[in-house]
Amino acid sequence: MQDMQFIDGEYIPSASGKKIDVIDPSNGRVYHQVSAGNAEDIDKAVKAARAAFDDGPWRKMSGGERAAILRKMGDIINERVNELAELEVQNNGKPLPEAIWDIEDTAGCFHFYADLAEELDQDEGKNIPLSEPRFSSIAVREPVGVAGAIIPWNFPMLMAAWKVAPALAAGCSVVLKPSEVTPITALEYGVIAQQAGLPKGVLNVVTGLGPDAGQPLTDHPGVDKLAFTGSVPTGSKIMAAAARDIKAVSLELGGKSPLVIFEDTDIEAAVEWIMFGIFWNKGEVCSATSRVLIARSIYDKVLTRLIEEAQKVKIGHGMEKGVLLGPIVNKSQFEKIKAAIARGQEEGATLASGGKTPEGLEEGYYLEPTIFTDVPLDSWIWKEEIFGPVVCVRPFDGEEDAIRQANDSRYGLAAAVMSADLERANRVARAFRAGIVWVNCSQPTFTEAPWGGYKQSGIGRELGEWGLNNYLETKQITTFNDTSPWGWFLKG
Ligand code: NAD
């Protein structure tokens, strides 16, 4: 396991020599320490990234040459899937099959953006028809420069890939600041970059606390673009900091996403997607469908089956076979979720299932899958992101009511609808005010499709071609093709 920061192609100790504890959420014990980076470390990393961008070979390489290195990074990650997944189980708590899935997706993300880097070679600039025949104009795309990437702890390697892979494909250099809670696999990017032959300084990883390392990165004048995934309050601070130097910014923030289930939905399918929508990755998923709306005529049936299945979920260490729910990522998140559960009860909602630490799992941060019913529309637990395995369920009466309840949120990251009537499902899909909509499912995410939120859930889109555009500037090149005088002198 790495413990130092990766700057300018090498692992080096932090300027202060200070360390951050890394905790195993299955037992709450410190098992590793990493550098506590600060403004000095960030400055070093940004200068390395700046030099690599301004004077290094990376952005001058063809897309095909960059693609070869990105592909190698993906291959190395694929070769190390099990080992990297186990590191994430220990650091984040997620069950091993889910961690393997994440790491495979991470490798896939590098392969996908390798293809897009290659496609950039075919892009000789878009011809822009002009109203003045003596001129011609083309629009070309170029890398935006040095990107600062700040990520959360729920998908430690994958969230980094969503930023690092398209940024590198575009020809940018990157300073990555992982979450202080889950720095372990993010630090492995250094070794992967070295082995894949990424030129030094193109990718830098600085670990540290948000205010100590994240903020200096957002404030640094050498950064051209900030890409952030995390909570709304931090996103707001980052946007404010970016405003000072007019840095480009993309934000992937929180959500309180609805899942609407119509009366013609198969009950068993509904139960499985409700569960996957909120208990997968312990509910530590920005797009988790944490508000479930069920047609009144099937409400009792769905709820009964949901409670039965939720109580069967195997909770335990992520490495244990059959476990679907691992420990919550750390003590502070565990306490936050417990406080939210207590608040829900105070607000008058009914705790229909779960809400406690399971018996025999008192060590570590384990919590039962939790279901609230009778949730008041104006309650905190209905409105705010809990970011844990806690779902709020309400009935609805008719399509209009479902859409109204679903859209009544300051967030707009994701939404889902289930119905046997695809015409209705698609009508509702269009009516949702959210950036990601699932029909007859919830959560499956594909590297090819755009990802991001409406309203307070963010700005911009990651993944797919949209993810690459995040790291590209557009430049017009306009040429005067005539030999006759322009005529300005003669006008007077
Ligand atoms: P967080 O906002 O607390 O932290 C995210 C990152 O920001 C961390 O690396 C942290 O160190 C850093 N940070 C904190 N303060 C900072 C500051 N002042 N300046 C710069 N950086 C700072 O979020 P979290 O608790 O790590 O993650 C959970 C949140 O992330 C949830 O709200 C969740 O919905 C969101 N999330 C969103 C998506 C998405 O794609 N929309 C994906 C995953 C998580």
Image: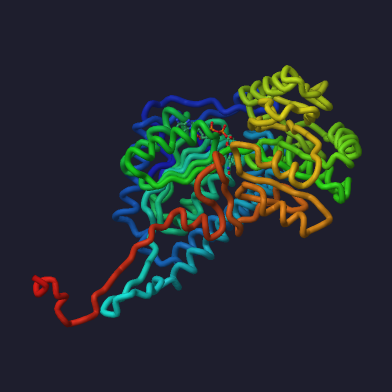
**Residue lying at 40% horizontally and 31% vertically, measured from the top left:** 14
Q: Residue furthest top?
A: 346
Residue at x 33%, y 72% (from the top left corner): 137
Q: Where 138 falls versus 186 (above or below)?
A: below
**Relative to 284, 228 lies left or right:** left
Residue 42: percent from the left, percent from the top?
A: 37, 36
Quadrant showing the C terminus: bottom left
Q: How many numbered badges does the structure rendering display?
A: 0
Q: Does residue 87 appear in this view? A: no
Figure quadrant of residue 90: top right
Position of residue 125 measured from the top left corner of the image (x, y, whole percent): 39, 71
**Residue 467 in the image: above or below residue 253:** below
For residue 57, what is the image quadrant? bottom left
Instruction: Give x and y (percent) for residue 354.
Output: 81, 26
Residue displayed at 77% across by 39% down:
293
Return the x and y of residue 459 as percentages of the image width and height.
50, 46
Seen from the viewer's position, the closer of residues 259 and 287 is 259
**Left or right placement of residue 90 versus residue 224 in this view:** right
In-front residue for pair 197/106 = 106
Quadrant where the N terminus is found in the figure:
top right
Nearest the camera: 230 or 78?
230
Residue furthest bottom in the image: 483
Between 178 and 409, the one nearer to me in the picture: 409
Q: How is the image coloured?
A: rainbow
Quarter residue 413 falls in: top right
Report the residue at 89% width, 41% height from top: 297
Say if residue 163 shows up in the picture: yes
